[in-house]
Amino acid sequence: MPSVETTRPAQQVPDDEEEPDEISWNLGFVEEPEKPHLLLRHHFPSKVGGRPAWLDPVRLPTREMLTCRASGKPLDFLLQIYAPVDANPVEGFHRSLFLFISPEGSRLREPGAVRLFRCQLPRHNPYYPSEPPTVKDKYPPRLRPSDADASRERDPWRSLDAERPPGASASSSSSSSSVSAAAAAAAKKRKGGSANAQTAAAELAGAAPLGDGAGGSGSSGSTTAAAAAAAPLPRISIRGPGGLYPELELVVEPEDDYQEGDDEEEALQQYRARVAAEGDLDDEELPPEVVEAVEGAAAPEQTCFADFQARVSWAPRQVIRYCFQRGARPLWPAPHHRPGPGDIPPCCHCGSPRTHEFQVLPQLLHYLHLDEEDPASPDWSTLVAFTCAASCSPAAGAECSYLEELVWVQPPAL
């Protein structure tokens, strides 16, 4: 797959232009985690639900950032994606995106009801060693007491204290450890100076890292206070304020693996090519499946949804579509409520254009254990994330290392 061109920022492709043939997508699928500790922050996971596995565990988003601007209520954590890119390979050696949604699902279309934050760290940083972990490593490195206090003060999910079961001690893990084997693989790729960002994102987000985790030295405060803080939130696996969505691993695979042998889609593409060259064809010249597809796609809404369904049918269980390549276009389920010219503003931190990076499909709703009768349950046609094409870093010494990006919400059709 082509690498992201850092000297030519990716740009949004107008809806009336075809996506380049060389674009390669990665698909995200959710699975019950076989080893939940692999979803802890030192394994740089991609996951849905549970508590956020903060990349930078200290300089967290502020309470205002974690508040729904539409309702004024705390946001619910939906998912995170580990996705290093070539745009900033040194300062963004580790790079994760965190997506939050309003607890009032009927208001997702309102400004500030869906918020996305990007965090990145260099390979050498205060929180993670730079070499692969050993098989004895089980928990993330412990933070300094002052850093742990700062984390607890900002984090409403108490992720830091939930990293270790009650009674776990520093002696149960090694005093120095390292990043996951997946991160080490990315380091090896970057030695040559040209990393394949798309492949790295797939490997780092989907591959299970070697070893059991990373440990560290230091104190986390009193055992009693830590045990109280680590108590489960009152509504585990139930959406809403004070609750968590079910925690699921997000496994990433190339879409190309699912495209072979799709006779209907190939026939439909051939039909469209012939129409462009020869004009409309008689029904007798078309395969029955193409006749059905064309007849069922007369209106713009039907055409759009038919194209969406045809593409998604290659891998019906997909919940995420990811691509940071120049020219990538979101797969829109409907023609309404799409961004127009000027609707996607440039990065407010560095001025670079924002480019499409990933989208959340409506299929994810099936895995969230929602109450369909609850008017507050979230719903969407798709959530499309646009991020800084340069993957810029916060200013030196910034209190928060998480930069807000933009999410375009396409609501379900009425």
Image (cartoon, rainbow, N blue to C red):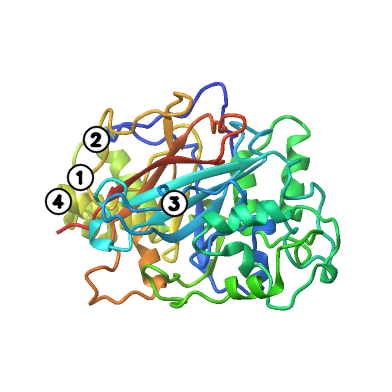
Q: Secondary structure at mark 2?
A: helix
> Which residue does the numbered mark 1 point to in the structure image?
281
Q: Is residue 172 above or below residue 188?
A: below
- Amino acid carrying label 1: it is Leu
* First reached walking from the N terminus: tag 2 or tag 3: 3
Mark before the other along the chain sequence, 4 or 1: 1
SS state under label 4 = loop
CA distance for labels 3 and 1:
59 Å
Q: Amino acid at mark 3?
A: Arg
Residue 7: x and y in percent read: 56, 21
Relative to residue 399, is residue 181 drawn left or right? Answer: right
- Which residue corresponds to mark 3? 63
Instruction: Judge whether 292 appears above or below 355 on screen.
Output: below
The residue lying toward the viewer, choosing from 327 and 275, is: 327
In the depicted structure, whether residue 145 falls above or below residue 124: below
Instruction: Identify which residue is drawn at 57% across, 35% down.
Output: 398
Residue 249 visible, this angle: yes
Mark linked to residue 278 = 2
Q: Which label's residue is closer to the chain start, 4 or 2?
A: 2
